[in-house]
Amino acid sequence: MASLIWRCNVLLKCSHFVSIRTYAFISDSKCDGSNYKVYKSTSHDIFYNLALENWIYHNFEVNDNSGMMLLWRNSPCVVIGRHQNPWLECDISALQDRQMVIARRKSGGGAVYHDLGNLNLTFVTTKKKYNRQRNLDFIVTALTEKWNLDVKVSERDEIILNNKYKISGTASALSCLKAYHHCTLLFDVNRDELENVLQSRSREIITRATESVRAEVTNLCEIEPSVTYDELVEGITKQYLNFYDIEGDVKELDPTCEQLPGLDLFYKEHQSWDWIFGKTPKFSIRRSFHKPNSGLFFNIDIDLIIDKGLISAVRLSGSTNPELLREIEKCTIGSKLWPRGNKEKQQLLDLGNIKQDRDFLSWISQCFNNIL
Amino acid sequence: MALCRLSNLSLKLKDVVRTCYHVLASKPVEQRAIFISSRLLWAADTNKYKKNTVPKITVSQTPVLILSSFIHSTGGLNGKIVQFNLSDIGEGIREVHLKEWYVTVGDRVSQFDSICEVQSDKASVTITSRFDGIITKLYHKVDDVALVGKPLIDVELADTETDGAEEQQIDEVDEIVTSDTVMTQNAKGDKVLATPAVRRLALENKINLSEISGTGKDGRILKEDVLRFLQGESIPETGPVVPPPHPPPSAFAPSPPEIHTAMKPKRRGPMVDPRQPKPASPHITPYIPRLVQSHLGKDELHPVKGMQRAMFKAMTKALDIPHFGYNDEVNITSLVALQGQMKSAAEERGIKFSYMPIFVKAASLALHYFPVINSSIDEKGENIIYKASHNIGFAMDTPNGLVVPVVKNVQSMSVFEVAAEMNRLMELGYDNKLQQSDLSGGTFTLSNIGTIGGTYASPVIFSPQVAIGAIGKIQKLPRFNEKGDVVGLHLMNVSWSADHRVIDGATMARFSNLWKAYLESPAYMIMDLK
């Protein structure tokens, strides 16, 4: 009987992915069955936009004669790849100082800085029709035709301007039937902020998470000042629709109020700690801390293994009572590794039961707080 | 053809089959069959199904054909293990990095269930199962490279078509139910988890499954467990289902041979050793450094960490201090003459004799006259803080490296009390049990480098302290006395370093002379003792 119920859950789960659901806004297709649409998100909230992208990916009607291009941009934030370590990719405390958010997308690849000067394009197709080169060609053609810019696509599927500067990065996600490719296009981002936030303070991390490949970037508007968001949207849409020989226009979508069933679940997932930090591939970090105004060699080495964002193993060593260290270790196992500066982080260590001088414990607590 | 569709999922299999059976009851016996597929449960008459599919089970002469893993562990089914290969991802991708497993060995999966997440060329790819069954093997660990076309997992199928045509007669419907469930009763009444294939293996080999401890999920007995049992191997106690976790990248590896081994004697002897007092012995056992293994011809990279890192930081900070040095020779012949008496006095009180407490106490006495040497500078360099107490640190070599425990309030302690406190701190130091409070709060430092060797040194000041002394070894050397005769004297060298921003040379020299006088004429020291 248990197996029957279990099976039932699986059936429901499968249907979620393979059933052909058609929602009003993507239903009208041409008489030959082809269906290509261009949408523009009106939200600047990274979590809503990622949720929208994901929702479309899961709900868009799949066939080899259909596709969708979604255009979106976000308020300042950092977006890391599916298998990256946020502590290694950006300066989380700098983000918090600026009240910027960090988001983890579903696709692979590296970390990128987003603001309103960065256009994101998502191309949803069947897995069979997944072709990053073709998608990037829409952009390259638009930029060449409209502004006569010197752009080409590199081997890494990046768009390179004037043979030197990267202006677009690519990533994608594939499942058994569907796929999406998305890319950025820097036209007027705040490059100082980009530099500031995409610096890690945690060089001691040992991990096999995907590392970003650094590249010299520039903005399209620095080479061609007439490039604007609207012009880009118009130019690339034209190329996209021309390619599929379709007449149409960009339609606006508001993920925050559109009746898209289930989108809120994607939204919740995307902005949850468990997704952003908890999905970090297992890593370890080792750091030494020296207590100021103490004997010269009074210091503590903290070794941590962090799995799913939680401290899964901890080893302290230092010139103090080992039993005390073992006790502190016990208290910290399973704690969340908060981003630096988070209010809740102050409560990271519940060392209340340990009999030891408060000053010392609060220093240890500080060390844990500052380890990343 | 579908006569009975599975509508009520809470139905027991028994009921389902029974319902089907009743539907078929009107048919002649030889035309009855029940199909069970993964999605639907059908009852149909035998005319409708293909001749080449041979029913495995019959219920009251009605064949029940299990088409898929609806009842994956139905008795009589023999799970076949298939390899699930990593399918072509496209774009000429040959290899991917395995990033995350969504399943572990022993998990049941069905078609479209996510198996794992792989990444290649900035594409995150969700691999979904093409089979229904139980996972028996994962071929890769997280972060391994998986090749397209090569096996990813093994799945034990529950598919009749893969099995030889073998009929099993079951007369009562209820018997199906008993064998359907993966749990069965053994002789003792304990529940044993195992798949039918494993049960059969056990049956064929006349093994009682209850004697085997399973290593699968929830203690499920896996085929490997049975095979191991047959080979007489011991079964790992409560073995985990998950593949061995990736070894943490060196974080918890036992500490590599300490880098500073070369400069640190491995014998437990500290600068002052309470266990093996070495009073004034001119002969110092040569320390033979342990050979540090290195790969000849290959540079090695060691991160600066631990003690070394602390040393690195403190010493870098010390670079801000303009050091000046002042060295002198101290004739401690009179003190050495008292050694016998002092030693027995100390031992009577259970303290091992050493000169170091005397040096420390003498320093404290001298500090009374030169309080600036017992001062510190505040962070901004605006104020000199004259410290209220003489907290004198002494460097000691421990198995865990050099530490500087602090004897607090030396100004109000007797020599004996200083010695007792130093003994205590050294005992703790050996056992790596020094508390943070034992190591902090120093206002002045003496380092007895002489126990290792050497005469003069250039000690480096610990910020925010302003002075430090290093004491060399005691040697018997010839010197001229007042009459011009050569005499043998017990001599010891002292090297002071002071922060020249705060202390001038004359102050340091006077301090040194006073300290020296206490040691050269113990009578002076007795007079000044508080």
Image (cartoon, coloured by chain):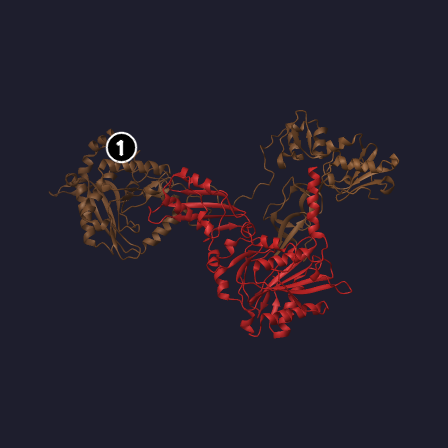
Chain colours: A red, B brown
Residue B451: give x, y in percent of width and height: 29, 40
Location of residue A64 (image quadrant)? bottom right
Report crowding for label 1: few under 14, some 14 to 19, many 20 or more residues within 10 A (C-alpha). Answer: many
Q: Is residue A162 above or below residue B175?
A: below
Kindly identify which residue carries mark 1. B351
Who is closer to the viewer here, B133 or B513? Answer: B133
Q: Quadrant of the C terminus of chain B?
A: top left
Who is closer to the viewer here, B411 or B299? Answer: B411
The amino acid type found where label 1 is placed reads Ile
Residue furthest right as drawn: B28
Q: Is residue A186 above or below residue B126?
A: below
Q: Is residue A297 above or below residue B348?
A: below
Location of residue B277 (image quadrant)? top left
Q: Quadrant of the N terminus of chain B?
A: top right
Residue B121: give x, y in percent of width and height: 61, 57
Label tally: 1
Using the image, name the chain to which the residue with label 1 belongs. B
Residue B178: give x, y in percent of width and height: 73, 31
SS of the residue at dot 1? loop
Location of residue A301 (image quadrant)? top left
Residue A123 showing in the rendered view: yes
